[in-house]
Amino acid sequence: MKVLLSLCAAVITGVVGLLTAGVVTAAYVDWYNVSSFEGASGFMVIGLALLGGVVSFVVGLVVALAMAAAGRSSFWWSTLATCGAILGLGGAVALVLYLLADFPPTIDGQELQLEVEIRLPAGEAIPSGESGVDSVFFLGSMVDHTQRASRYGTLKLEQARMENGRWIVPAEVLLFTSRGLRSIDARIGEKSIAGFIVPLPAHPEKADEQWSGWGPQPPPGSPPWPDTESSYRFRVQRIAPPPPPETDEEYQARQEVAEQAAFDALPADAPIPVWLPYTASWQKEPRRTMAIERITGRSDYVGELGFLMLDEEMRQAEAALRFVAQIPAPPASLIGPVTAAGHDLIERMKAVNATTLEQDPDYNGAADVGIRFSAWLEAVRALRESVGADFIPELREMLELSRIRTDSFVMQQSVRRVASYYLKTWAGVEPLPGDPPPN
């Protein structure tokens, strides 16, 4: 019975140890900015929590067995004692970590940037920004005359200016900690141009957002700081929080403004291929209507469209063919160009049928045919409804050619299946047994 109670005490102690180690480690990860790259911080929290749980279990078991053997304590007394010791140790570790951590000071909840201007000695020049000389500026945290932490900033040589015969070089760095004295160090190449302790309070106030006087300030009664030495002044500036992430509505509105601006910038006589993308059915009004009017308002738009329907660029030909269905009342003059596009498609299907699998293992030719056929059929449907055009001979030949390449999914499903359906619908021609049924 004593062994069972000891095990229960060890399990309780182990759980407390696991939770305590996990909480302390999570605080350490947050306070010391442990990298989360590839889950490093998460693995650290989980690993140390498990280690704390195992160690606490062992300690709890040993203590419980020892006390039970000595007959000097009850189950609850030994459990509370070990759990209390673990919680106390965890609290002490957390307190030490907190006191040693770097917490950036803030003003009204905003983190701060330390801005410094370094005034070089009279008569001293700075290297040109084009000379390629490296420049370094960093802020240090000094405790007991020892630099315990530092953060690199930026020495802005390109913004240096001349005032009263002396060069002034601006610099900035994140005010990363409230601990210790603040030291600054600035170098250009191998030469140090500044090294000072900045008398900035641990927690700056709004008054520190104004420029300080030029320092260092010698003690009362001492000679003023010589012009032959560098001097500095400083202030803090609040770091504005990043703007909130853009909502979907804001993104869509911004995209719409950009698209409308690009559309408005198009000249009225822009080539037809420029207007075609704006004629798709998913385009917004009134851009779509205006694009259609820009195309159909041309004196020879039928001829230009017919030329584009035969374009080697598949997407160009597709857009031109699909445009026929976007015209409110497609004219009979488009029958000739669409018929020519059908004959061109027939020749392309013959070329695909004559191509071996080794010559076109990816079926790129069949894919080209499938897209052109879908667009051609859309133009055909529009002209049949508008002016009663036929296109049955072309459709019949396309169906016969599509039956040859049974190894091509596109030829069978995108061409043969659709062609057999419309040939039956428009001409009463029954499909062959091998023709895929309509969806």
Image (cartoon, helix red, strand yellow):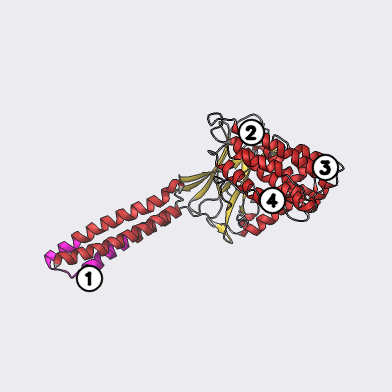
Q: Is residue 176 visible?
A: yes
The furthest residue to the right: 299
Q: Is residue 143 above or below residue 186?
A: below
Q: Mark 1 points at which residue?
A: 76
* Residue located 76% across and 49% down the image: 383
Judge depth for marks 4 and 1 and give the one in front. Answer: 4
Q: Mark 3 points at which residue?
A: 301
Q: How many marks?
A: 4
Residue mark closest to the camera, 4 vs 3: 4
Residue nearer the viewer, 106 or 390: 390
Provide the residue designation for mark 4.
426
Q: Name the residue under label 2.
A: 350
Question: Residue flagged by tag 1: what amino acid is it?
Answer: Trp
Q: Which of 230 and 437 is in front in this view?
A: 437
Find out whether the residues at labels 2 and 1 contact each other: C-beta distance under 8 Å: no
Gap between marks 2 and 3 measured at Cα: 30 Å
In front of the other: 49 or 81:
49
- The amino acid sitting under disc 3 is Tyr
Find out whether residue 84 is within the magenta segment.
yes
Going by the numbered disc 2, the residue's amino acid type is Lys
Query: Where residue 109 appears, x then y in whole percent?
Result: 57, 60
Q: How many residues crowd mark 1 within 10 Å: few (<14), some (14–19), many (20+)?
A: few
Q: Is residue 98 left or right of residue 392?
A: left
Q: What stretch is highlighted in magenta?
A: 63-89
Q: On the image, which quarter does residue 241 sit in?
A: bottom right
Question: What residue do we see at 71% from left, 37% from top?
Answer: 343
The CA distance from mark 2 to mark 1 is 90 Å
Q: How crowded is mark 4: few (under 14 residues within 10 Å), some or many (20 or more)?
A: few
Q: Where is residue 325 in the image (x, y as percent from the top left)?
A: 74, 50
* Secondary-structure class at tag 1: helix
